[in-house]
Image (cartoon, rainbow, N blue to C red):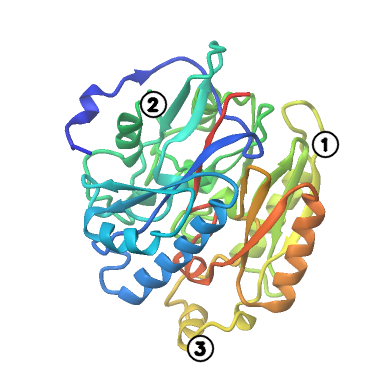
Amino acid sequence: MKPNFVFLCGVATAAYFRPAEWGAQSSVIMAWPSADNPAYKNAQDDLQDATTDITSIAQAVAKFEPVTLLVVQSRLDEAKSQFADSKNITLKSIDAYPKLDLWMRDMAPTFAFDKTNTSGQLFGVDYNFNGWGNKFPTGSCLSLASMLCYDTKVPRVESSLISEGGSLEVDGEGTLLVTESSVLIDNRNPGKTKAQAEEEFQRTLGVTKTIWIPGRKGSDITDGHIDGLARFIAPGKVLLSRPNTLEGGGPFVDTYREAQAILSNTTDAKGRTLEITEIVEADLEKIGADKDLVEQVQNGEKDYPSLTYVNYVMVNGGIVFAAFGDKDADAEALKVIKDLYPERTVEVVNTQTLAFLGGGIHCSTQEVPVAE
């Protein structure tokens, strides 16, 4: 990929529609992180452990549908060796984004279709990823989304917002869940109002109702993405992540309680009262993590890990779901998800490293939908 192609990339301006994740998909985009990314520059163990998690997720997704795995040139030989015997996984070298990270939900395009065209033409919305409010500069003057749009010949939709895919949860029937903390924040969209954001969401996602959850600025690297808190199971049905204890309060408990209250007292775009199922998060002290790491979290030296089970990804006929090492919580969460999706095969992957890096399975994947 060459760094000058953005001028050739068409910018679409019509109205678009983002389908729900449970719809048909052609593939999933993932990435191995680069050693030059500042998140791993002085933490090679994290780089290797994160790579292991991503590899496991990719192999799980590949049981259901093709995976395109982005890899920087310096790691391409390593990736070729790793996936030599893997089926359904295609490696894609990328040389114009040296600080490539693994969080494709946020960095890759958010795919949508033209509402006025029945041809099934796919578009890629570019929400101008800026490293979650410049916490981690991307090292490139171009967005990864624009690069991928050009390289795959998918027309690019330029957005007036700075946002991330993990901040946007749609039901495919006009409803959007989103946190205020990750959108209406000065490090992304200074001066933007809710009305302005909603207008752009309507244009780029095809939604007619936006349900805002307050969230907490600074609670994690993403400023509180919705995909770690609440997900649509189906139209009118939401899965809500509940902290493993509600004692003592704190920002995560407060966020959960606010979300519960809002979701319980609102309707979706079709006027339906939302049916809420709760799923309890894993316990930090029961996941078997390194004691020093746990102490660093408890002392506030590191962010609290993302031990939420709602950060799964839906694929064709299946779900790729997390385990963290808390045996009781893992087992109970798996039971909940199997009960909610009896028609889907559930593949479980341990993603403890990703949790300590601030994300999970959904954060590391971006599905490419098929028009229905």
Q: Which of marks 1 and 2 is in front?
A: 2
Name the residue tied to disc 3. 291
Can see residue 146? Answer: yes
- Residue 111 coordinates in the image, percent (x, y): 49, 32
Q: Disc 3 to disc 1, how far (Cα)?
A: 44 Å
Q: Which of marks 3 and 1 is in front?
A: 3
Check disc 1 and report its element: helix, strand or loop: loop
User: Which residue shows up at 44% across the image and 68% down it?
Assistant: 52
Q: What residue type is labelled 1?
A: Thr
Name the residue tied to disc 1. 273
Who is closer to the viewer here, 130 or 189? 130
For residue 241, which quarter of the picture?
bottom right
Left or right, 175 with reference to 341: left
Q: Disc 2 to disc 3, how far (Cα)?
A: 47 Å
Quarter of the image that includes the N terminus: top left
- Mark earlier in primary sequence (1, 2): 2
- Residue 67 coordinates in the image, percent (x, y): 47, 47
Q: Residue furthest bottom?
A: 291
Tell me the crowding category of disc 2: few under 14, some 14 to 19, or many 20 or more residues within 10 angstroms, Cα based: some
